[in-house]
Image: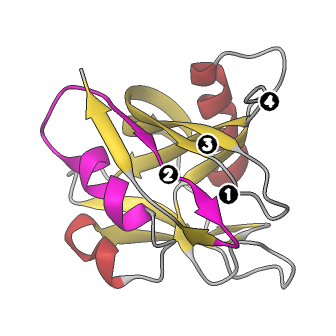
Amino acid sequence: MPYTPIVATLGYVLSPDRSRVLLVHRNARDDDHHLGKYNGLGGKLEADEDVVAGMRREIMEEAGIACEQMQLRGTISWPGFGKGGEDWLGFLFLVTRYAGTPFERNPEGSLEWVAIDRIMELPLWDGDRHFLPLVFDADPRAFHGVMPYRDGRMVSWSCSRI
């Protein structure tokens, strides 16, 4: 059976001093599959855009800021991750420079600046604890991971760098 994932972006916006990251606390909708969790910003790619354009659009829509500089930190295949067991393929970016003032909240929840060294204390998807260190580390190589989910829980994690 062919792998036909939902293609998406996930971005982590750094503060100008690079000590904090802008996260959304998904606390606005009771029917949200991510309710209560903290997450980066992003979403589904549209048919007529590349992943960079998609990341820029999502950051503008969700935070009201324009990405001026960003780097692809990695990709993750999430088989079975969706609310209905859908497969997802995500392109993860670190936004290192932006223009504008971020919103305080969006339709998904409140936007919060969190110290990078405190992220792991937050309610996150279990899988995020495996890849977030790679998003923020000093290794210039992109990572490429596979993180299957079953019944809302991470099953395994494997990752390569080239």
Q: Secondary structure at mark 3?
A: helix
To which residue does mark 3 refer?
Answer: 59
Residue in view at x 40 percent, y 54 percent:
157
Secondary structure of residue under mark 4: loop
Q: Which residues are magenta?
A: 128-152
Q: Which residue is mark 4?
A: 1
Looking at the rendered image, the disc whose residue lies closer to the viewer, 2 or 4, is 4
Residue carrying label 1:
81
**In whole angstroms, how far apart are the C-alphas of marks 1 and 4?**
17 Å
State the residue lying farthest toward the left.
138
Q: Quadrant of residue 54?
A: top right
For label 2, the crowd category at 10 Å Cα-Cα, with few meaning under 14, some 14 to 19 and many 20 or more, is many
Say the numbered circle drawn on residue 32: none
Q: Of the residues shown, which amino acid type is indicated by label 1?
A: Phe
Q: Earlier in the sequence, mark 2 or mark 4?
A: 4
Work out which residue is located at the far front of the displayed protein and give it: 1
